[in-house]
Image: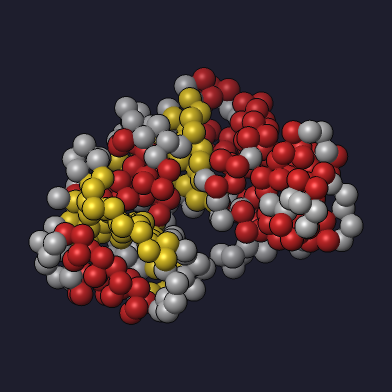
Amino acid sequence: MMIGIDLGGSNLRAAIVGEDSTLSAHCKEEVGEPRDPESIVERCAKVIERTSGGKPTSAGIGIAAMLRDFEGTVANSPHLRWRDVPFGKMLARRLPSYKIGIYNDVNAIVYGESVAGSARGSRDVLGVYIGTGIGGGLISNGHLVEGTSNCSGEIGHAKVRWDENAAPCACGSRGCVEAYAGGSNLQRRITKELSAGAKSAAIALAGGNIESVNAGHVDLAAAEGDEWALGLWTEIAPLVAVTLGNAVAVLNPQRLVLGGGVLSRCPTLYTLITTTLMVAGNAPSLEALTIVEAELGDDAGIVGSAHLAGRGVSIVRP
């Protein structure tokens, strides 16, 4: 028995994951409030105990956070409003009979795709997800790359600008690609520009309410040739594409998995990014690359975190 948990800013999902990656005893609940570390630890512990039937086993938790070490220390989680929280130690002490592993959520997601999704069969994989923010994960020779301090894969914080006008990012720095293309920042820009008088068919597509316009409406407008929407997408797509191209040039993966809520809702933006990547990227690296869309959806993080903990990766000592 392996248990996988995906802990995001909005929802907590858990399931038993079989060796063949089938899921059972699936549960989902809102994170809600309170979300202080002690409360979240207790909720995770109860979900693990309930899902396992009280039988000690391995439990992997993919959390929407930057990690600092291999003990599950959360350096920064904007969605949970945590900084410098020893989450792994706290949960391991609460469940001393269980094998607890704490992983960055996108690392767990990409590992899940490599085990049972669109990257299965590939030994070298780069996964990049554009949702509320931008996250990445890397599989090398079949193994998750965690880095020296367990914060490998943070591609959303690759810099695409570095000047006094660079956009601020939730990480505390400026000029990150997430500050331009991450869903939260993108939504703020869409609302700001349309509220300031920009004309776009996206407003009509959203029922005439500027506050309701989202990236999906902008994508539909861009597909129809809307000038403002196309201008926004042709500004953003190269920033993402060059970031991906640089990563592919350095890492030389066999498979590039692209996913996340923004890309899944925005096929026009997806096409612009992948087309620009094939132009801007390093030709020898691109020759060996296959670009695929994420396959497992919300189950990817559950599958990945369960397999990582089941295989003994970064188990936290109580």
**Quick check: 180 left or right of 108?**
right
**Residue that appears at 71% across and 57% down:** 212
Please tell me which residue is depicted at 24% across the width and 40% down the height of the picture. Answer: 22
**Between 79 and 136, the one nearer to me in the picture:** 79
Q: Tell me the residue at 62%/59% (across/down).
A: 184
Say if residue 170 shows up in the picture: yes
| Left or right relative to 259: residue 228 | right
Residue nearest the observer in this picture, 124 or 148: 124
As rendered, which of 183 and 274 lies closer to the eye? 183
Q: Quadrant of the C terminus?
A: bottom left
Count of marks overlaid on the render: 0
Q: Is 227 left, or right, of 167 in this rendering?
A: right
Q: Quadrant of residue 49?
A: bottom left
Residue 280 visible at all: no
Determine the residue positioned at 51% across, 41% down: 259
Farthest-out residue, front: 207
Find residue 150 and report its horizontal and vertical position in percent: 37, 57
The spot of residue 98 in percent (x, y) is 15, 63
Indicate the colouring scheme: secondary structure
Residue 15, position as x, y percentages in the image? 27, 53
Q: Looking at the picture, does residue 44 appear above or below residue 238?
A: below
Residue 294, position as x, y percentages in the image:
45, 37
